[in-house]
Amino acid sequence: MTHAVGHRGPDGEETMVDGPVGPAFRRLALVGPDNGTQPLLSDDGSVVLIANGEVYDHRDLEKSRIPDVALRTRSDCEVLAHLYAREGRHFLDHVAGVFAIALWDRKRRTLVLARDRFGIKPLYYARVGDQKGRAGSPRRPSSRSASAGGS
């Protein structure tokens, strides 16, 4: 699966399978290049996040909304996993940035796909066969196999 999005970045590759989801990630490291590998996890590991983009106010969010959380990476997107763990579905209400995310809530067995309010970063998904899907940014989205989505 990561081969299909290899054009997204040469700086890291990770695949994880957890029940009905299997997030895969290719990284172009701009922020936190030495330790920002994904997926990013909440403290208890119940929230799994794959993100593309930049959270402009990540330092302010860290200080004001999750001051008791010790971030494990220098990725600006890590705050999103912790915000979701704390605030649930409204976690993006006050986030500034450009991003597309796939978040797997292991406790609720829920997949959340979201992107910034203006849709700057693309998010494509498809349902293929029985309960199988994919999210990412393909080179050439096909109207037959991918739909633009967002929240």
Image (cartoon, helix red, strand yellow):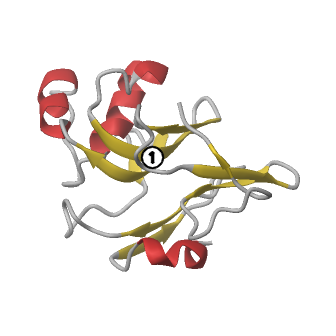
Q: Residue at x 56, y 70 (%)?
A: 139
- Whether residue 146 is situated above or below residue 46 in the rendered picture: below
The residue sitting at 60% across, 52% down in the picture is 124
Residue 58 sits in which quadrant? top left
Using residue 57 as the reference point, say whether residue 116 is left or right of it: right
Compare residues 85 and 9 and report the one nearer the observer: 9
Q: Amino acid at mark 1?
A: Ala
Q: Is residue 62 above or below residue 98?
A: above
For the image shown, how many numbered marks are present on the structure?
Answer: 1
Residue 77 placement (x, y as % from top left) = 30, 46
Q: Position of residue 95 (x, y in %)?
A: 29, 29
In the rendered image, the quadrant that contains the N terminus is bottom right
Horizontally, residue 87 falls left or right of residue 124, namely: left
Using the rendered view, name the quadrant where residue 83 is placed: top left
Q: Residue 9 falls in which quadrant of the image?
A: bottom left
Identify the residue position indicated by label 1 in the image.
100
In the displayed structure image, the side of residue 121 where residue 63 appears, left or right: left
Asked if residue 19 can be seen in this view, the reply is no
Q: 61 above or below 143?
A: above
Q: Where's residue 90, x and y in %?
A: 43, 19
Residue 32 in picture, x, y percent from top left: 19, 61
